[in-house]
Image (cartoon, helix red, strand yellow):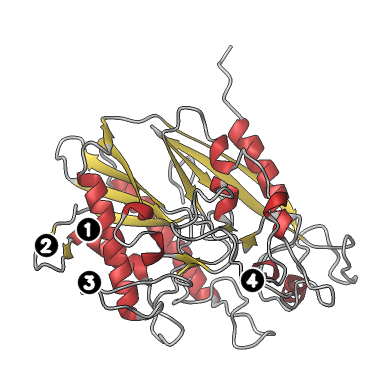
Amino acid sequence: MGLDVDYVSVSSTHVHETRDTIGIWGADFATSGVDLAYNDSINHKIAEAVRDGIAALEPSHIQYARTQLRDQPGGTLRYVGDARDPMIIDDEIRIMRFTGATSGETIATLVNYAGHPEVTGESNQLISSDYPHWLRDGVENGIDLADGTVMPGVGGICVFFQGALGVQIGPSRSSPIDYDGTPLNIRGERTATVLGERLAQFVLTALGDSSGSVTDETAALGFRNYEFLVTIQNRAYHIGFQQNLFHRPTLNNDPELPIRPGYNEPQINTEIAIIDIGRSQIITVPGELDPSLFVGGYDGAYTPEGHTPLDPGRTENPPDLTMAPAAPYIRDLARDDAEYVYLFGLAQDQLGYFVPPYDYELSRASPYLIQPEGSHYEETNSIGIDGWPRIADKLTQLLAWRPTAAP
């Protein structure tokens, strides 16, 4: 781009109501859904946004805030659910707001929250950013409350970053209601509107709570990133690469030779990063992270009140929590003085779902190609059973690294 930029991190919201930028959602299984011209336009707009940001640089103060859905009216399941056991939901909304050092006006607000943007539903035929639109608009411009009053926005631009939405964190098994208390369908445009506005209200309330947020006049900045190879074990993805669905290069495999487990399996390059901004540390993951891998929660600490991690009615291939991993979890590995730890999902890459190895189930007849009995869809859209262990190993190393003092 010809700019003096140290690092650019790109993250997807994983919205279901827009173009296929990956390739596996085409008209049929043999046709890529990627429009290369559209992807190229997105790349140019990203570069333009970076240039515009550099041109508008100014000294700023930074406000940190957070809130949890469990503390909001109706509790966590009013706003988001989890379709796969164990029901573990990272319900924290993490916020950073940057204000002009001289003007005091909002430059930008960063919101980090976990939930699939698929609330408008499959019947929607229009391109939409789903609930993040109403979230961003509400934070920027304010919200009309049910009692006829207006909660003012903070101005500036609001940027949404997806969190640990792996497994099925989203509208499934949630119980949304409208402002007047009327139950809503779990999917629909009205549901997406209300959810986005509710989340915006929680963000604005957290920012307005001087006792629950903190503002600094400056912040130390730093980052470290690491690129490495991962092996694609998913047989469906092997077919996808052979059909040229993905439009990304593979390495260390011969396309003229057959692919078998452990033999000639393609590899691709991916990337992780750790970004430090003052009191906060941002951990990026190149896919959809199961929230239990981020926060743990097997003891019920992140299971909505009144529920248990396991649904007793599910008897096919349920997870065995006695085999679940013990701490530390990814968030526990953040730097000791990081008061606010953010998780940016689908950042730098999208490798599908990251499933805990103890609960990773494959069909014996057709691994990866069909879903095994029980709630194990995510495995069919993962790079393979060794995918998360490799990502976790590299993340652990990167989180443990500290700069050494100059001699």
User: Which residue has dot 4 on it?
Assistant: 314
Secondary structure beneath dot 1 equals helix
Q: Residues within 10 Å of mark 3 (few under 14, many from 20)?
A: few
Report the amino acid beneath label 2. Val
User: Which residue has dot 3 on it?
Assistant: 179
Q: Is residue 392 above or below residue 314?
A: above
What residue is drawn where x is 66% and y is 46%?
392
Residue 64 at x, y percent in the picture: 32, 40
Report the amino acid beneath label 1. Glu
The answer to which quarter of the image holds residue 236 is bottom right
Earlier sequence position, callout 2 versus callout 4: 2
User: Which residue has dot 1 on it?
Assistant: 140
Among all residues in the image, which is located at the extreme left? Answer: 148
Quarter of the image containing the C terminus? top right
The numbered disc on residue 150 is 2
**Residues at badges 1 and 2 in contact (C-beta under 8 Å)?**
no
Whole-number angstrom distance, CA of label 2 to CA of label 4: 44 Å
Report the amino acid beneath label 3. Tyr
Q: Residues within 10 Å of mark 2 (few under 14, many from 20)?
A: few
Report the amino acid beneath label 4. Arg
Earlier sequence position, callout 3 versus callout 1: 1
Between residue 376 and residue 297, name the one nearer to us: 297
